[in-house]
Image (spheres, rainbow, N blue to C red):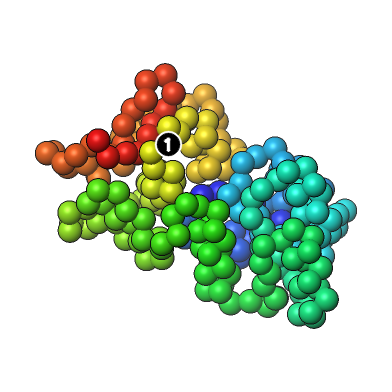
């Protein structure tokens, strides 16, 4: 799942980015409201994390304009002030939740997970297909009782497949949700990662879960 963080305080931005990346999210960062709006509109983010006080354009104006142009990604506002008026203004501008600075990272993460669940048909923190399960809080994967060790990218890929099971996912869509702004579309890296993931989750004799859809991409389904 891919997240845009718009925060002008470089230290806070780095802290949030590193923390989210450690949790296997793909993160892009913008340092002002105009750049943030431009990225939010040109890329396909699963979630926006927006500071309210930003240079060039406030977080409130950013989300208001994003929503006016039919942007649907959920948004979490980071507000320095904890007043009722600020929270109301944030929610009325189109944000879905807010967090008052300074915040504990554990709370930011819990809110991120909650907002991502809201946008997904899967409401449980444990995603499943057939005898495979992925716990999105602990990041543990299991199939038929055996534990599967995943790298950060493999985890991100599996989570994305599970949240969109039964859907055909093109390589472009997969890249947009799992790789960041600097992804080079000319490579076969997605196929390489899918094959690594398959080797881990589909042992010999086990039912195939990731199906190749020729000329398009992949679909996770039981067949
Ligand atoms: Ca700020």
Q: How many marks?
A: 1
The image quadrant where one finds the C terminus is top left
Percent position of residue 47, x then y: 61, 53
- When asked about the image quadrant of residue 208, the answer is top left
In the picture, measured across the screen, residue 154 lies left or right of residue 35, that is left
Residue at image position (78%, 71%) is 88
* Rendering coords of residue 98 (x, y %): 68, 69
Answer left or right for 176 relative to 139.
right
Residue 65 % position (x, y): 81, 49
| Left or right: where 68 falls relative to 214 | right
Residue 8 lies left or right of residue 121; in this view the side is right
Q: Residue furthest top?
A: 215
Q: Nearer the viewer, residue 128 or 185?
A: 128
Vertical placement of residue 167 versus 66, above or below: above
Q: Residue at x 52, y 34 (%)?
A: 173
Q: Spot the residue most to the right.
A: 56
Element carrying mark 1: loop
Q: Is residue 172 above or below residue 126?
A: above
Task: Name the residue at 56% across, 74% down.
Answer: 107
Q: Nearer the viewer, residue 23 or 52?
A: 52
**Does any portion of residue 35 appear in the rendered image?**
no
**Which residue is label 1 attached to?**
167
Residue 214 place in picture, x, y as percent = 37, 20
């Amino acid at each position: 799942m891919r997240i845009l963080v718009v925060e002008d305080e470089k230290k806070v931005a780095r802290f949030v980015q590193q923390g989210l990346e450690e949790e296997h999210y793909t993160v892009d960062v913008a340092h002002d409201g105009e750049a943030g709006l431009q990225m939010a509109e040109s890329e396909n983010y699963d979630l926006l994390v927006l500071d309210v006080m930003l240079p060039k354009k406030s977080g409130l104006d950013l989300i208001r304009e994003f929503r006016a142009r039919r942007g649907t990604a959920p948004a979490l506002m980071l507000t320095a002030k904890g007043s009722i008026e600020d929270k109301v203004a944030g929610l009325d501008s189109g944000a879905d939740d807010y967090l008052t600075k300074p915040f504990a990272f554990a709370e930011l993460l819990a809110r991120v997970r909650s907002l991502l669940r809201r946008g997904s048909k899967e409401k449980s923190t444990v995603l499943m297909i057939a005898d495979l399960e992925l716990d999105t809080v602990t990041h543990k994967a299991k199939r038929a009782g055996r534990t599967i060790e995943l790298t950060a990218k493999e985890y991100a890929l599996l989570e994305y497949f599970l949240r969109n099971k039964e859907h055909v996912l093109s390589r472009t869509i997969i890249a947009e949700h799992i790789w960041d702004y600097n992804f080079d579309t000319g490579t076969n890296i997605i196929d390489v990662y899918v094959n690594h993931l398959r080797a881990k989750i589909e042992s010999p004799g086990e039912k195939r879960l990731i199906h190749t859809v020729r000329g398009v991409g992949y679909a996770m389904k039981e067949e």
